[in-house]
Image (spheres, rainbow, N blue to C red):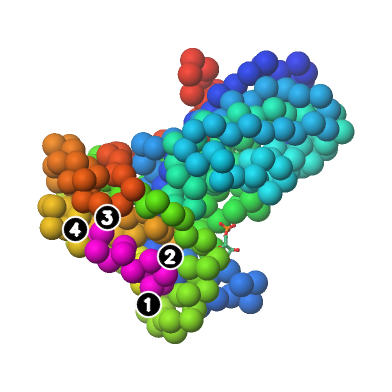
């Protein structure tokens, strides 16, 4: 990797989006314990904001504010700290650099929206900028993949096909701008636990194992009605098995006019597709007052991946 030209900027803020999965096909567990995926991610307008400043060499520190801040560790268990240390190590700078991070969270914890992955992606970009590593976002993809299955997608955003264990991403040919409502739960679901329940339920992986052609056609058409009919998630059954109330929430969304309803990732967030902005606002109000979820958030997608926020431009 490139040598740093110090000093770099004294502060940078990067924001990275949450994701939903428009389709999530899951295969049988691999020998390494991960499951092969055929998925389509879409980045939505709910963001994590990571502000980084230089710290003394060897000091990596983190403060978290916002949604669910008190539920997260701020040490090496946190993916953002791991991301900063990994980048320092790969750049052979471990004894020469440090980083202070502040994460302002909007994305709920353990929600199936990849908030932790967004933190890691934003941290990679922020650290690369602070340490003046001459790296483009795509240069960070291999490190992102080592950090977690959803981290590479958080770097690119938009709408993308994911394969491997989810870490291998390619932009999808997609049209349209979609209005989503996220039904957020008052508690989280552990991703490994949902995958374990998936295994326990004795699933039959789809054959052929690929993203459904009808979904790709729906995305090419840009027609929300067509997309709504194609939403599918193989982790929905295990998520509902662990949290039966999700079935009721999905049905409530459909009854309130959603043209598609699906559990996002490993859940428990449910994503509802609306026909229009005004339909999404009505759906948000209806779901918020249904008593079936903690709250509902209106978001749009696709949005770009991790990039500097505020006034700084990414070159
Ligand atoms: O990659 P990530 O750290 O997000 O994965 C968290 C956990 O989810 C893994 O340890 C594994 O138990 C499960 N997982 C899986 N198959 C995948 C992705 C995640 O079994 N493709």
- Residue in front for this viewpoint, 87 or 193: 193
Residue 6 on image: x %, y %: 77, 18
| Residue 288 seen anywhere in this rendered image of the structure | yes
Q: Earlier in the sequence, mark 1 or mark 4?
A: 1
User: In front of the other: label 3 or label 1?
Assistant: 3
Residue 206, numbered label: 1
- Residue in front for this viewpoint, 171 or 244: 244
User: In front of the other: label 1 or label 4?
Assistant: 4
Please name the residue shown 49% across and 48% down the image: 109
Q: Tell me how far mark 2 sits from mark 4, CA to CA.
A: 28 Å
Q: Which of marks 3 and 1 is nearer the N terminus?
A: 1
Residue 252, numbered label: 4
- Residue in front for this viewpoint, 208 or 66: 66
Q: Tell me how far mark 2 sits from mark 3, CA to CA.
A: 30 Å
SS state under label 2:
strand
User: In front of the other: label 3 or label 4?
Assistant: 3
Relative to 27, is 303 on the left or the right?
Answer: left
Q: Tell me how far mark 2 sits from mark 1, CA to CA.
A: 10 Å
SS state under label 1:
loop
SS state under label 4:
helix
- Residue beneath disc 2: 38
Please name the residue shown 58% across and 34% down the image: 64
Q: Are marks 2 and 1 in contact (CB under 8 Å)?
A: yes
Q: Earlier in the sequence, mark 2 or mark 1?
A: 2
Q: Tell me how far mark 3 sits from mark 4, CA to CA.
A: 8 Å
Q: Give the range drawn in magenta.
A: 238-250
Please name the residue shown 21% across and 51% down the image: 290
Relative to 41, is 227 on the left or the right?
Answer: left
Please name the predominant secondary structure of the magenta segment in the image: helix
SS state under label 3:
loop
Residue 108 on image: x %, y %: 45, 45
Please name the residue shown 18% across and 38% down the image: 281
């Amino acid at each position: 990797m490139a040598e740093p030209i110090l000093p770099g900027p004294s502060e940078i803020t990067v924001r990275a989006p949450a994701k939903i999965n428009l389709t999530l096909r899951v295969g049988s567990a691999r020998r390494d314990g991960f499951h092969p995926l055929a998925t389509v991610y879409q980045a939505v307008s709910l963001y994590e904001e990571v502000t980084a400043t230089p710290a003394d060499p060897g000091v990596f520190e983190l403060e978290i504010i916002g949604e669910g801040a008190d539920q997260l560790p701020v040490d090496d268990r946190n993916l953002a700290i791991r991301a900063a240390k990994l980048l320092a190590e790969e750049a052979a700078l471990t004894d020469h650099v440090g980083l202070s991070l502040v994460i302002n969270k909007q994305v709920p914890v353990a929600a199936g929206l990849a908030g932790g992955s967004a933190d890691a992606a934003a941290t990679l970009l922020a650290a690369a900028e602070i340490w003046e590593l001459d790296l483009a976002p795509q240069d960070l993809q291999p490190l992102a993949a080592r950090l977690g299955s959803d981290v590479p997608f958080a770097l690119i955003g938009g709408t993308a096909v994911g394969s491997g264990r989810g870490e291998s991403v390619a932009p999808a040919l997609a049209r349209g701008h979609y209005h989503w409502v996220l039904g957020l739960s008052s508690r989280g679901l552990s991703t490994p636990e949902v995958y374990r329940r998936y295994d326990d339920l004795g699933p039959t992986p789809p054959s052929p194992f690929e993203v459904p052609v009808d979904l790709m056609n729906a995305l090419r058409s840009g027609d929300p009605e067509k997309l709504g009919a194609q939403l599918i998630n193989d982790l929905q059954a295990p998520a509902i098995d662990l949290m039966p109330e999700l079935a009721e929430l999905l049905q409530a969304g459909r009854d309130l006019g959603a043209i598609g309803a699906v559990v996002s990732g490993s859940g428990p967030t449910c994503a509802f597709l609306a026909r229009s902005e005004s339909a999404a606002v009505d759906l948000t109000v209806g779901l918020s007052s249904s008593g079936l979820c903690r709250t509902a958030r209106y978001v749009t997608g696709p949005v770009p991946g991790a990039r500097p926020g505020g006034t700084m431009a990414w070159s």
